[in-house]
């Protein structure tokens, strides 16, 4: 009896407790949180597309998390998860709809850290349909923000247009705040990047960076979506959905107000010269559908990757500041994104689906003295873990309502990690706009993925990730998979119950 009690206490304390025993001073915490930046575009994850030396530097000096998943692959909901450590149905933000705002008064990471004497700030993209609450400082982009001469909402609620390129400005403001902060207190700063969000407008200095590169099409680029109704039914292909004007920047009238009109005359001249040349290439291929599709794919990648290049350079600026100011030693630096993104896999851009490229998100982290350089973490981490883990690493008690686990023990590979999760739960809602992806929930284990689509139609999908990494072959209903399916359904039901997702439970029960 006594033994059981001791084990229970040990288990509880592993789930969330102060992970370092002798923490003398609380660490500073810097989270760089980008938008739509995906593992396929990061060299630390083996990208074939580009080099990201500064993101890689964080991984090299600390840890590369190889299996990090989001609960709902879309911007505002993912930010709400970062702040609360709770699933969308609990924190209240299920989609990006402007009709719903995040409740800024609910329990959030910055409020908890403030109580432990942290100075807290959020700079950059926020996108929660309400203004930040509980931060000592914030300066945020309204809604999605703009790439050139962007508006920022200041703390006095004034909207101020700033001269410059958004990624540079966000770093300028973050560094300014770091420099002027109260140096007696530890800090928690989130740098919310706009890059690499649509419509991928590069800094003029990066425009031509990928010009001479010809990118190979992903293996499943020409997916015919057979046996996957929701995949067939989406509106997010490079072929049909991507816009020649807004996305691919052809035929732009730079004197019209709007995203191109915001550029300075100098910037407009550089853009015009560059995209006029692109238009010549377009005219050569426009009547050949295969060549045109390849042209669109190359142009999409070049612009997306160029916005990532500016972001990586700016991450380097922030890391250099931490090194030069002596802060690096006691600062946890995390780089992650609100979700992954399709770089042509299944013929797509955008995210939302529970398929690998958008279910995953990059996550690298350094914490000198605590994480051994070059650590690789293979366990499944979910974005509900971010808030409790950060709070725990700060040496602060984690609220019991948070739904994630603390990943602190994974950092030093203590033996208790064998009790770590073996499956994760996902639930996406936004439909039909803007990309017509049916709502769905599901489970991903190390080997399998089972998805239940609902709303416009009811459909199940099952994938064997070991045999079918690109998720083309829906095995649901295959007799040989009967037992595996039943077992996954049981696990899925348990996760739905564990996370208290009553809406999903209702749908799940209709199949019984
Ligand atoms: C905009 C984009 C969509 C994108 C959503 C959500 N269209 O609506 O392509 O999926 O944002 O992105 S655009 O024409 O306005 O660029 S999110 O990252 O904020 O979730
Ligand atoms: Ca996003």
Image (cartoon, rainbow, N blue to C red):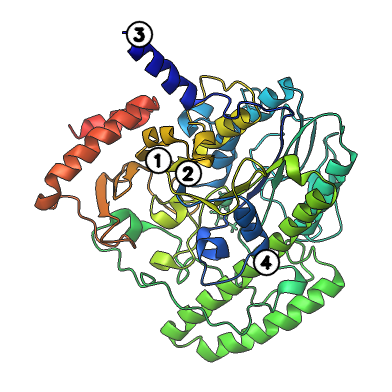
Of mark 3 and mark 1, the one earlier in the sequence is 3
> Height in image: 185 above or below 45?
above
Could you say whether the residue bearing mark 1 is in a helix, strand or loop?
strand
> Height in image: 221 above or below 145?
below
Q: Name the residue at the top extreme.
A: 1
Residue at left offset 52%, top offset 32%: 406
Residue at left offset 57%, top offset 23%: 398
Of mark 3 and mark 2, the one earlier in the sequence is 3
- Asked if disc 1 and disc 2 are in contact, CB closer than 8 Å, the reply is yes
Of mark 1 and mark 2, the one earlier in the sequence is 2
Viewer-side residue, 471 vs 94: 471
- Asked if disc 3 and disc 1 are in contact, CB closer than 8 Å, the reply is no
Q: Circle 3 is placed at which residue position?
A: 2
- The image quadrant of residue 464 is bottom left
Viewer-side residue, 221 vs 21: 21
Query: Could you classify mark 3 by the number of other residues whose Cα lies within 10 Å: few (under 14), some (14-19), or many (20 or more)?
Result: few
Q: Name the residue at the left extreme.
A: 479
Of mark 4 and mark 2, the one earlier in the sequence is 2
Q: Circle 2 is placed at which residue position?
A: 70
Direction from residue 377 to residue 299 in the image, left or right: right
Of mark 1 and mark 4, the one earlier in the sequence is 4
Q: Quadrant of the C terminus?
A: top left
Q: Circle 1 is placed at which residue position?
A: 426
Q: CA distance from mark 3 to mark 1?
A: 38 Å
Viewer-side residue, 496 vs 367: 367
């Amino acid at each position: 009896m006594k033994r059981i009690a001791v084990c229970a206490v040990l288990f509880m304390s592993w789930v969330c407790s102060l992970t370092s025993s002798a923490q003398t001073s609380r660490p500073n915490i810097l989270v760089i949180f980008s938008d739509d930046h995906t593992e396929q575009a990061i060299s630390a994850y083996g990208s074939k597309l580009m080099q990201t030396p500064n993101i890689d530097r964080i991984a090299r000096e600390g840890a590369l998390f190889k299996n990090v998943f989001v609960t709902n692959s879309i911007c505002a909901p993912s930010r709400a998860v970062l702040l609360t450590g709770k699933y969308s149905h609990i924190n209240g933000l299920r989609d990006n709809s402007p009709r719903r705002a995040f409740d800024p008064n609910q329990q959030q990471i910055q409020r908890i850290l403030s109580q432990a004497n942290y100075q807290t700030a959020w700079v950059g993209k926020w996108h929660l349909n309400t203004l930040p609450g509980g931060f000592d400082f914030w300066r945020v982009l309204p809604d999605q923000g703009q790439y050139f001469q962007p508006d920022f909402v200041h703390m006095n609620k004034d909207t101020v247009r700033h001269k410059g390129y958004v990624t540079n400005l966000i770093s300028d403001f973050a560094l300014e705040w770091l420099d002027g902060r109260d140096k007696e207190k530890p800090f928690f700063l989130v740098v919310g990047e706009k890059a690499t969000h649509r419509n991928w407008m590069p800094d003029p200095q990066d425009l031509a960076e990928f010009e001479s590169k010809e990118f190979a099409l992903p293996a499943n680029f020409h997916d015919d979506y057979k046996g996957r109704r929701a995949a067939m039914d989406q509106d997010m292909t490079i072929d049909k959905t991507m816009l020649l004007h807004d996305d691919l920047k052809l035929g732009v009238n730079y004197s019209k107000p709007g995203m191109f009109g915001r550029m300075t005359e100098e910037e407009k001249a550089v853009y015009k010269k560059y995209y006029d040349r692109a238009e010549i290439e377009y005219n050569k291929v426009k009547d050949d559908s295969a060549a045109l599709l390849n042209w669109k794919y190359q142009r999409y990648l070049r612009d997306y990757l160029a916005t990532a290049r500016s972001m990586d350079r700016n991450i380097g600026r922030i890391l250099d500041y931490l090194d030069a100011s002596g802060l690096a030693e006691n600062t946890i630096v995390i780089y992650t994104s609100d979700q992954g993104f399709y770089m042509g896999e299944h013929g797509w851009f955008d995210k939302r689906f529970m398929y690998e490229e958008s279910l995953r998100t990059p996550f690298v982290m350094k914490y000198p003295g605590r994480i051994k350089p070059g650590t690789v973490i293979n366990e499944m981490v979910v974005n509900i873990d971010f808030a409790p883990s950060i709070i725990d690493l700060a040496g602060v008690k984690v609220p019991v309502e948070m739904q994630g686990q603390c990943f602190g023990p994974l950092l030093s590979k203590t033996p208790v990690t064998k009790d770590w999760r073996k499956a994760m739960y996902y639930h996406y809602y936004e439909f039909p706009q803007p990309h017509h992806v049916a709502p769905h929930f599901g489970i991903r284990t190390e080997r399998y993925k089972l998805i239940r689509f609902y709303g416009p139609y009811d459909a199940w999908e099952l994938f064997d990730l070991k045999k079918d990494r690109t998720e083309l072959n829906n095995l649901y209903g295959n007799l040989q998979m009967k037992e595996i399916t039943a077992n996954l359904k049981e696990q899925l039901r348990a996760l739905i119950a564990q996370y208290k997702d009553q809406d999903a439970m209702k749908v799940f029960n209709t199949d019984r």
